[in-house]
Image (spheres, rainbow, N blue to C red):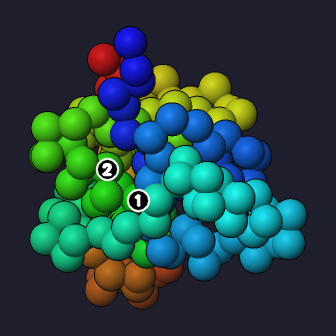
Amino acid sequence: MADENVYVLDSSAIFLRKVHGNAVTVPEVVEEIVDEDSRFYLSIKMEEGGLRVESSREEFVLEINEVAKRTGDIHRLSKTDLNVLAKALEIKRRGKKAVIVTDDYSIQNMASVLDIDVEAVVQKGISRVVKWVKVCRGCGRRIDSDICPVCGGEAMLKKVKPKKKV
């Protein structure tokens, strides 16, 4: 039986030559592939039809941004990461099984929250879902900005309430 999964690739999958099955990535990942060997590998996979490049739809990017704000991952995810997640969510909403291929822990954390499967490239992968909050280095208050409005201290990210991955 053919593999019905759609593999959504982060740049680590391309750098480490882990393109397989029905694979798709986003233009932002392609822009990150700058070394000659990886660009050649990418072009071969695209020519063979083993990899498509598709933009993420804005509605899914907006939804991913909202979820990332709730989990605190918004402070740790790049524009590329957000688009990879949005593409996977779009595929899932079309009724197909999306599997994100990445070693990025913040992408894996968000994928767990969104109930999207992950295939790690080299690393073991996450074992717990983590929520991040900004806190002031000086007084320890939870804050939304980069500078504490109470004491003027700098913000830092802190993990809160880790939950076991299901």
Residue 132 is situated, as x and y percent measured from the top left of the image, at 37, 52
Q: Amino acid at mark 1?
A: Val
Left or right of 61, for residue 43: right
Left or right of 62, for residue 71: right
Task: Please tell me in which quadrant of the rendered image residue 83 appears.
Answer: bottom left
Task: Determine whether the residue tagged by mark 1 lies in a helix, strand or loop.
Answer: helix
Closest to the observer: 78 or 135? 78
Dot 1: few (<14), some (14–19), or many (≥20) neighbours within 10 Å? many
Dot 2: few (<14), some (14–19), or many (≥20) neighbours within 10 Å? many
- Vertical position of residue 110 compared to residue 43: above or below: above
The label shown at residue 84 is 1
Q: State the residue position of label 2.
A: 88
Q: Amino acid at mark 2?
A: Ala
Question: Residue at 36% of width from left, 31% of height from top?
Answer: 5
Task: Please tell me in which quadrant of the rendered image residue 20 appears.
Answer: top right
Question: Residue at 22% of width from left, 36% of height from top?
Answer: 96
Q: Name the residue furthest top.
A: 1
Question: Residue at 13% of width from left, 71% of height from top?
Answer: 59
- Vertical position of residue 59 compared to residue 148: above or below: above
Q: Quadrant of the N terminus?
A: top left
Q: Quadrant of the C terminus?
A: top left
Q: Is residue 4 visible?
A: yes
Residue 42 is situated, as x and y percent measured from the top left of the image, at 68, 61
Q: Is residue 66 visible?
A: no
Residue 82 is situated, as x and y percent measured from the top left of the image, at 37, 65
